[in-house]
Amino acid sequence: MTVLFDVADGVATITLHRPEVRNAFNGEMAEMLSDAYRRCDQDDAIRAVVLTGTPPAFCAGADLRAGAETFAAREEPTFSAAGLSMTAWQVRKPVIAAVNGHAIGIGFTMTLHCDIRFFAADAKYGIVQVRRGVMGDSYSHWTLPRSAGLSNAAEILLTGRTFDGRAAQELGVCSRVLPNDEVLPAALALARDIAVNTAPLSVAYSKRLLWETWNLDAAAVEALETEYHGYLMGSPDAREGVVAFLEGRDPKWTGRLANDWRLP
C-alpha cells in the first residue's frame, strides 16, 4: 500500500507510504491518492482531510530509480503532467497538508493543491525539475503564483533551488512553520476544530469560491457570494450555528453534501 487511509472523529488522514524511498511518487501512489480524495469528497462522515507522509520525508518527488529513462518521452494520448486525476482543491472539504519532511518536485507541487499548508522548519522544499531537464508539473504554474505571487513563483520554478520551511513561509507557500514532529499534530488539531465547529455546506461553498476567484472579477465574486449566501441563509444549519453559539455548546450540523449541494 503506497497510500494509507484512516478516518477518526470526522477527519481523514491520508499518508503517503513508501518510506524505503522517502515516499517517492509513482503511478500507484498517484492512483491511490486520487481515489482517496474521491472518497473524502463523497463521504459526508469526513469533514476535513489531512495529507501527510510516513517519516523520514513527506515526498522526495518522482521515483528516479529508472535512471536516465525516468523522464523518457511519453507518446500515449492519456499522458498528463497533472500527476493526479483528482486534486485536493476538488475535494469539497478543507484539505490540510501536514508537510512533515522533505517535499521535492511533485512532492512539493501536490501540496499546492491543498487549502492550508503546515511545513516542517528543517525540511527541504523545491520544484527542482528544471535542474533535471524537465519543468514544474502538477498545475504548479497555476497554483504557485496564487500563493507566492508571480515574482516568488518565478524564482522557485525557474531556478529549481531548494529552501527550508522558514524560507517557504517568507515566500508565501505555507501558513505555519513548526518543528518537524509538531506538524502533523497541529494539522490534526485544526482539522478536528473544522470537523466540529464549521458547517459542512458553508465550508464547501466558501472553498469553491476561493478556488474560483482568480478567474472572476469583483462583480462576479459578489454575485456568487450573494447566490451562495442566499442559499445558506434560512437553512437549518444557519439557525443551529447561531443558537449553538448563544447556548455555549458545540453545534449539531444537519446539512449534507450528498443531499444539499446545489452545484455541479
Image (tube, helix red, strand yellow):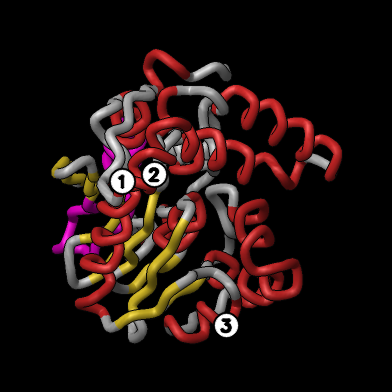
Q: Position of residue 39 (x, y in %)?
A: 29, 29
Cα gap from disc 3 to disc 1, whole angstroms: 41 Å
Q: Residue at x 69, y 36 (%)?
A: 225
Q: How many marks?
A: 3
Decide whether residue 198 is among the magenta residues: no
Disc 2 marks a residue whose amino acid type is Thr
Which of label 2 and label 1 is nearer to you?
1
Which quadrant is the C terminus positioned in?
Answer: top right
Q: First in sequence, mark 2 or 3: give its number.
A: 3
Q: Position of residue 212 (x, y in %)?
A: 67, 40
User: Could you classify mark 1 by the number of other residues whose Cα lies within 10 Å: few (under 14), some (14-19), or many (20 or more)?
Assistant: few
Labels 3 & 1 near each other (Cβ < 8 A): no
**Circle number at residue 247:** 1
Residue at numbered disc 3: 170
Name the image quarter holding residue 32.
Answer: top left
Q: Secondary structure at mark 1?
A: helix
Q: From the viewer's perspective, is 107 left or right of 228?
A: left
**Circle number at residue 129:** none
Q: Residue at x 55, y 72 (%)?
A: 131
* Viewer-side residue, 244 vs 201: 244
Q: Position of residue 94 (x, y in %)?
A: 41, 46
Disc 3 marks a residue whose amino acid type is Glu
Disc 1 marks a residue whose amino acid type is Glu
Q: Secondary structure at mark 3?
A: helix
What is the span of residues highlighted in magenta in the rendered image?
15-35
Tell me if I can see residue 1 in this picture.
no
Cα gap from disc 2 to disc 1, whole angstroms: 16 Å
Cα gap from disc 2 to disc 3, whole angstroms: 29 Å
Residue at numbered disc 2: 198
